[in-house]
Image: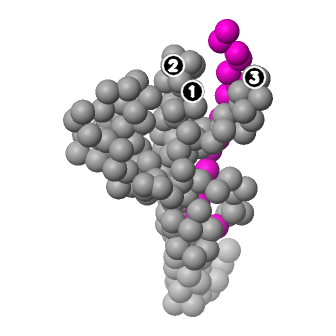
Amino acid sequence: MTRANIKGVKGFSLIEVLITLLILMTGLLGLAGLQGRALTSQLESYQRSQALILVKDMEDRLNANRANAASYITNPTYPSPLGVGYVGCTTTTTTTAARDLCEWNYALQGSAEGATLGAMIGARGCIYRLSAAVPNKYLIAIAWQGLTRTAAPGVDCGLDSYGSNDALRRVITIPITIANLN
């Protein structure tokens, strides 16, 4: 290069700096959005794992008390859903099924984590009898409120509990079959 060409090169122009900053800011905003989605996904995953633990817990309780399995059937609306204001829990609860439902109710509220922390958002618990014929078939379901909209689940546990749009409701179910004990 000649000396005249070197004098003409003085560094970046202001427009080049602005374009570089624009590209950098677009990338940083995208990264911030990605971080927000990752946090939402992490909370949804945590809630699903909590629901899996609790649905498996009730399956074990029902299996342990097979002779009284019909006592575990819940009605999602009466006296109130398990997990939210359930009135079946008292200090004089004597039957195994009533005690199991009471303890499951508290677990749905998050009391297992201490001071109602760590549970799913607005968790509801439901136990349905699918078939009264031998073998008896039951369905254990847990519903909770998700953070993003998805397709509405087909099970009615927690129906209309999370606003008018059911796309925020999440449900996890587990079927259980109990053979004749005779």
**Which label belongs to residue 124?**
none
Please name the residue shown 67% across and 74% down the image.
1
Q: Please, is residue 123 above or below residue 160 in the view?
A: above
Kind of residue at badge 3:
Pro
Q: Are marks 3 and 1 in contact (CB under 8 Å)?
A: no
Q: Where are the magenta residues, as a range?
A: 167-182
Is residue 7 among what the camera can see? no
**Which label belongs to residue 135?**
3
Q: Residue 122 versus residue 104: which sits nearer the camera?
A: 104
Residue 144 pos. (x, y %): 51, 54
Kind of residue at badge 1:
Ala
Q: Please, is residue 106 above or below residue 148 in the view?
A: above
Residue 84 placement: quadrant: bottom left
Instruction: Provide the residue designation for mark 2.
Output: 65
Secondary structure under tag 3 reads: loop
Q: Residue 113 versus residue 139: which sits nearer the camera?
A: 139
Q: Are marks 2 and 1 in contact (CB under 8 Å)?
A: yes
Residue found farthest to the top: 182
Q: Please, is residue 124 above or below residue 22 in the view?
A: above
Q: Give whichever of discs 3 and 1 has the lower sequence position.
A: 1
Please name the residue shown 71% across and 17% down the image.
179
Residue 48 placement: quadrant: top right
Q: Main secondary structure of the magenta part?
A: strand
179 sits to left or right of 48: right
